[in-house]
Image (cartoon, rainbow, N blue to C red):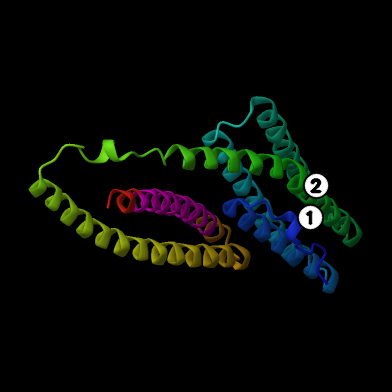
Amino acid sequence: MAIFEWKSEYDTGIAEIDNQHMVLVSLINELHILVNEKFDRALAEEIFEKLKKYAFFHFATEENLMAQYHYDAHDNEAHLAQHRQFESEFKSVQADFENITLEECNVVLSYLTNWLTNHICKVDKRLADHIHQQRQAESEGSTHYSSAELVAQSVTEEEAISVIGSLHITQKHIGNTGEMLEQLEACIDELQYHCDVMVQSASDSVFSNMSATAHYKCTHGLKLVKLIRSNHEYLKDALNKLE
């Protein structure tokens, strides 16, 4: 039985954070099952190392988002302090792992589960609220279009016909581009899922790190595609109003 059951209340609404949280939960459950079904210290240590590396990678992802969205200095400092404290605890446990007992391993698993639950529900959700607000502000800031800015008000009849024709052609291409962006987003999303699977299943630490890096690149790619799609929708709306 899993030690960490994922619940909807853990969702932050920030895809790159939620996806990585689910990978961490999966790794904690994998270690719990291994430890309690057949305690193999060497294999447990291998999974623990994988969990540590992915946790540190996840922290880096969050910290990049904190910098990108100019997180409040006080909240930023408190969030970073929790990450550094967790990393210190992880390293301390790992240093003594070769002598760890089954009981001690279960204590560590309980600590990991409780820490991550509290961190998600309190600290990460506060960060997610900030990111949501910043993204909403960015979206609203991109909608300020006016007909006067896009097309001159005084045009001849021939020029007007030419502009309308160009609008029809542009709208056609905009529609095709929208479909391609949807396909690209779905493709990257699927690739990101496979990267998560590889991080969980990789026995080689180098390959695991490569998978984690690929996951980060996919997350960044998805963000860019979503931003392009958002601007694409604003442009399409502006063209419709002009017509």
Residue furthest out toward the front: 157
The label nearer to you, 1 versus 2, is 2
Dominant secondary structure (helix, strand or loop) of the stretch shown in magenta:
helix
Apparent side of residue 73 relative to residue 233 in the rendered image (left or right) = right
Apparent side of residue 85 relative to residue 140 in the rendered image (left or right) = right
Q: Residue at x 72, y 65 (%)?
A: 43
Residue 61 appears in the picture as rendered: yes
Q: Residues within 10 Å of mark 2 (few under 14, many from 20)?
A: few
Residue 96 appears in the picture as rendered: no
Task: Give the camera-side residue of 41 and 177.
Answer: 177
- The kind of residue tagged 1 is Glu
Helix, strand or loop at label 2? It is helix
Q: Which mark is residue 63?
A: none
List x then y, in percent, for residue 106. 87, 59
List x then y, in percent, for residue 105. 85, 57
Q: Earlier in the sequence, mark 1 or mark 2?
A: 1
Helix, strand or loop at label 1? It is helix
Q: Is residue 142 magenta?
A: no
Q: Is residue 229 magenta?
A: yes
Name the quadrant of the N terminus. bottom right
- The kind of residue tagged 2 is Asn
| Residue placed under numbered mark 2 in the picture | 118
List x then y, in percent, for residue 227. 43, 49
Task: Give the camera-side residue of 238 and 46.
Answer: 238
| Residue placed under numbered mark 1 in the picture | 98
Q: Residues within 10 Å of mark 1 (few under 14, many from 20)?
A: few
List x then y, in percent, for residue 61. 57, 45
Magenta residue span: 211-237
Q: Residue at x 70, y 44 (%)?
A: 124
Figure check: 73 above or below 101: above
Figure check: 113 above or below 92: below
Task: Give the camera-side residue of 35 and 183.
Answer: 183
